[in-house]
Image: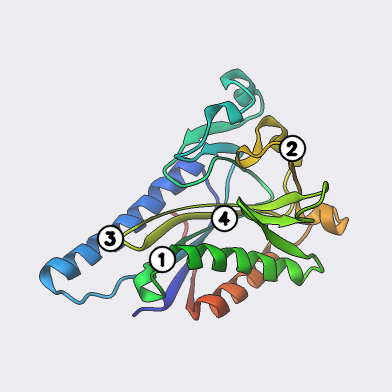
Amino acid sequence: MNKQVELQELGYKDYKDTWDYQETLFKGIVDTKIKNRREDANLETPNYFLFVEHPHVYTLGKSGDMSNLLIDEKQLAEKNAVFYKVNRGGDITYHGPGQIVGYPILDLDNFFTDIHKYLRFLEEMIILTLEEYGLKAERSPGETGVWLDVGTPFARKICAMGVRASRWVTMHGFALNVNADLGYFDNMIPCGIRGKAVTSLNVELGKKEVSITEVKDKLLKHFVNLFEAEMKFQEEKV
């Protein structure tokens, strides 16, 4: 089992270009697994963790409802935003500047073959990171992502999550609001859940801006501990 994970910092990158790149890495792992099974090749499968920041974009998952996007094409253009239907789980999500978007592309045969456990570990990584900032983040039963003040009228979502998995290989991932422009969330029903607010780390801390680099470092620390992984750092613009 290969527990090495290659970190790639993609910087500020178009959503569709990043999605295509994810698909390339994902297919490479799946093809290796097929070769191993068919030819008893015993080749090691790689793992990746992509960090990226996207221009304004709304994405709709396979089970999503188009009516959860509240603006039309003209209004999208006015807001310098784009829209894509994607092949992950979940409903509608917004990505934009000030968010940390993470895409773990892992062969879970290298770690554990349990998608439920995988999702809980991703949530736990976020929860433990926010705990370091004095915030009590939680899961909300029946609702994806990570939330604050669950079970109260003040419940608000701080991290969205949606993944795809095939042959125990994962793609897509999470979007943590750090210094996000929350106005963009008004143009949709977040994850198809009505009447729930969205927040950002800087808002919760009463700061104009929180260090993105610092938050990433904390996320990676908890990822490594939870997955018992070894992170291989490599900056690579693609």
In the picture of the structure, the residue carrying the numbered disc 1 is 106
Label 4 close to label 3 by CB (< 8 Å): no
Tell me the SS state at disc 3: helix
First of labels 1, 3 by sequence position: 3
Provide the residue designation for mark 3. Answer: 30
| Residue linked to disc 2 | 195
Please report the residue visible at 45 percent of the width from the left and 41 percent of the height from the top: 16
The 10 Å Cα crowd at callout 3, few under 14, some 14 to 19, many 20 or more, is some
Q: How far across and down, in percent of the image, does residue 128 sit?
A: 68, 71
Q: In the rendered view, tell whether residue 52 sits above or below residue 14.
A: below
First in residue order: circle 4 vs circle 2:
4
Mark 3 or mark 2, earlier in chain: 3
| Image mark for residue 174 | 4
Q: Could you classify mark 2 by the number of other residues whose Cα lies within 10 Å: few (under 14), some (14-19), or many (20 or more)?
A: few
- Residue type, numbered disc 4: Phe
Along the line of sight, the residue nearer the viewer: 197 or 58: 197
For the point 36% across and 67% down, the residue is 107
